[in-house]
Image (cartoon, helix red, strand yellow):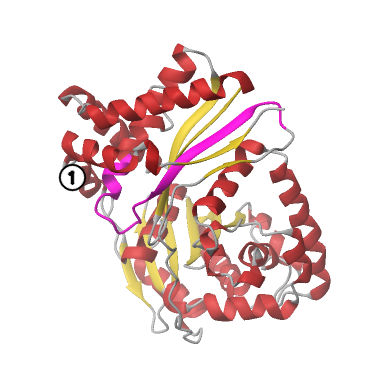
Amino acid sequence: MNHPEHWTLSNGIRVIFMQVNSTVAHCGLFINAGSRDEFEHEQGIAHYIEHCVFKGTQHRKAFHVLTRMEDVGGEINAYTTKEETCLYTTFLSQHLDRALDLLNDIAFSSSFPEKEIVKEKSVIIDEINAYRDSPSDEIYDRFEDQVYKNHSLGHDILGTASHLKKFKQQDLINFTQRCWNTDEIVISVVGNFKRKNLETLIQKYFGQQPANLRAFRRIPPVDYSPSHAVLKRKNHQAHLVLGARTYGVRDEQRTTLVLLNNLLGGPGMSSRLNLSIREKYGFTYNIDSSYAIYSDTGLWSVYLGTEGNTVERCRDLVMKELKKLREKPLSTLQLHKAKNQLKGQIAIAQESNGSLMLGFAKTFLLFNRVDSFEEICTKIDSITAGKIQTISNELFDEKELSTLLYPAN
């Protein structure tokens, strides 16, 4: 695999590029701004803007924005997280000029026409309502709000209908001017291009954008204290989340926790929680653990859905698995298998050029560099059974875990 190249424009926008032998290319514009950066009265505006950039620019009406890439068989999409906004497109390589032109247009020339953005409020309210109909999804947001109480990291990315209804055109402009800073933007490209030609086109479309440097720092969350809550809502199953705050993206312990989380409740069917609670007892269809990593904090959690009369039994079984990891170090064979599994998952993900483009941008936004697969494997290989047991004792102490339960009706 080629190693990515990178450079920086005079306005602070960074570019990361990897050449691949493919007729299909992927390009994304990543902004280090998300729902975390909203003021209290702006809840949901980062996600709202992500929708509204497609509703018209100074040069195109909404229809022409939406069809610009589709007319040549390409795709354009976007997403918002707590800490980033991404606009990205996939297309045949000969349409690079068109793709960069459109990304520049929607990122820096969106006009947010009143008629269009008012209609989009109804679309997002429907999205919010659909999300509320899925307790297995909603409970994660409620849990983050519980763990990051009174902090913007706890806010739902979608926002609330009451906040959404109040947004005006100027509110969207104010947020983008404050948070869409050129020194916090990365353009990521994976495709069969010559660097010189790519540099020329990126300079053409993005190099003349005036510099808009970040003038604020994110406020870290206050100290964590475990908490427990039960929220009654209409659902057939019981839903349970337990977890705690943990390491941010710059913490050296992060890689060890990624491996530990993968072993405990990752996507594989052989994860410890899946084998114990689903395969052995048949108590649940969905059980997993996750590790949400932010710039200065992280959240590790376990989720499960089960019948109302087995939820406490499931919780006890989860705690039993956590206790095993605290009290007994992994054997050499167990550790070897866990490392190989994680390496394989990473390698498979890197088979997708689209995933590579997204991964490069996310890493480059934070670190201004990208590790090769070999460097990632070296970090994984350095993990010891002792490190895993130390982190298990630090995180998996029942007294340090918060819980949120949606009981069955």
Residue 381 rendering spot, x and y as whole percentages: 18, 39
Q: In the image, is residue 271 above or below residue 100?
A: above
Q: Answer yes or no: is residue 254 visible.
A: yes
Circle 1 residues within 10 Å: few <14, some 14–19, many ≥20:
few
Q: In the image, is residue 47 above or below residue 216?
A: above
Q: Quadrant of residue 135?
A: top right
Q: In the rendered structure, does residue 237 fall within the stretch colored magenta?
A: yes
Q: Is residue 242 left or right of residue 40?
A: left
Q: In the image, is residue 184 above or below residue 271?
A: below
Residue 313 rendering spot, x and y as whole percentages: 50, 20
Q: In the rendered structure, does residue 309 fall within the stretch colored magenta?
A: no
Q: Quadrant of residue 364?
A: bottom left
Task: Specify the amino acid type for callout 1.
Answer: Thr
Residue 139 rendering spot, x and y as whole percentages: 60, 42
Q: Is residue 86 left or right of residue 307?
A: left
Judging depth in this view, the residue of 97 and 113 nearest the camera is 113
Judging depth in this view, the residue of 328 and 186 nearest the camera is 328
Picture mark count: 1
| Residue under pointer 1 | 378
Q: Answer yes or no: is residue 194 visible.
A: no
* Quadrant (top left, top right, bottom left, bottom right) of the C terminus: top right
Residue 250 rendering spot, x and y as whole percentages: 30, 59
Q: Is residue 85 left or right of residue 44?
A: left
Residue at point 68%, 64% (across, down) = 48
Query: Which range of residues does the magenta coloring cover?
Result: 235-258
Residue at point 45%, 54% (across, down) = 358
Residue at point 56%, 44% (across, down) = 140
Mark 1, secondary structure of its residue:
helix
